[in-house]
């Protein structure tokens, strides 16, 4: 598939669950968002559960791999991109954050989120309000909500086309 570079990147910090990660990356492909996996992951990229959940959509997006948080941070510094962490402890609601092209959305591990040192490195810590006393959304659902809001704000949601045709706003 030929498409312009993505205006947004979704980074998965040490993901635990192959099926969740595959489904998240499938969503990235559908929305035209690039992705990155920050190792170590709890599965191999060739894991059949990951490939099954991502289907052939995994071939339709750019997936960067960083073998550590330090390497990811070095790459991010070199590219001068803002980092917005999705966290239940975020100071800012997703709706109150002003996204810009080039932003990186970061989601943590399904089992543990991110360590404080990673949270401290984020330029923004965002939360998605949910009904009390519930604690959190599934990481894939939260990532989808955040990607759609970010793309909406920067006017880069995919254009609705008949099935099989692809076009993205420039």
Image (cartoon, rainbow, N blue to C red):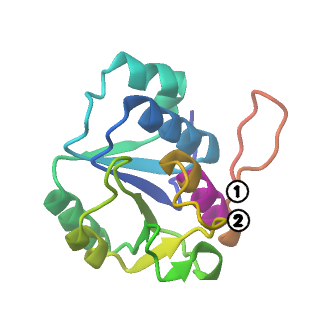
Quadrant of the snapshot with the N terminus: top right
> Do labels 1 and 2 touch, CB within 8 Å?
yes
Q: Within 10 angstroms of label 2, few (less than 14), some, or many (20 or more) residues?
A: few
Which residue is pictured at 43% across the width and 64% down the height?
A: 104
Residue 157 position in % (x across, y down): 70, 56
Q: Which residue is mark 1?
A: 157
- Of 122 and 36, the residue lying toward us: 122
Residue 4 image position (x, y, % from top left): 56, 51
Residue 114 horizontal/vertical position (percent): 29, 61
Please provide the residue range marked out in magenta.
Answer: 143-151
Find residue 6 and name its label. Answer: none
How far apart marks 1 and 2 lie (CA) works out to: 6 Å
The quadrant in which residue 62 appears is: top left
Please identify the dominant SS of the magenta region: helix
* Residue drawn at (76%, 33%) of the image: 165
Quadrant of the image containing the C terminus: bottom right
Query: In the rendered view, does 107 fall on the left or right side of 41?
Result: right
The residue that label 2 is drawn on is: 152
Q: Residues within 10 Å of mark 1 (few under 14, many from 20)?
A: some
Q: At numbered mark 1, what does the secondary structure look like: helix, strand or loop?
A: loop
- Return the x and y of residue 80 as percentages of the image width and height: 32, 75
């Amino acid at each position: 598939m030929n498409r312009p570079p993505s205006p947004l990147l979704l980074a998965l910090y040490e993901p635990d669950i192959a099926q969740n990660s595959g489904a998240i990356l499938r969503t990235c492909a559908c929305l035209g968002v690039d992705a990155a996996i920050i190792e170590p992951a709890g599965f191999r990229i060739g894991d059949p559960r990951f490939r099954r959940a991502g289907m052939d959509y995994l071939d339709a997006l750019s997936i960067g791999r960083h073998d550590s948080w330090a390497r990811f941070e070095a790459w991010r510094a070199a590219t001068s991109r803002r980092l917005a962490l999705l966290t239940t402890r975020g100071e800012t609601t997703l709706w109150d954050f002003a996204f810009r092209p080039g932003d990186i959305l970061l989601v943590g591990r399904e089992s543990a989120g991110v360590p404080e040192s990673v949270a401290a490195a984020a330029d923004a810590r965002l939360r998605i309000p949910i009904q009390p006393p519930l604690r959190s959304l599934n990481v894939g659902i939260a990532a989808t909500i955040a990607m759609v809001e970010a793309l909406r704000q920067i006017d880069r949601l995919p254009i609705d086309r008949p099935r099989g045709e692809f076009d993205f706003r420039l």
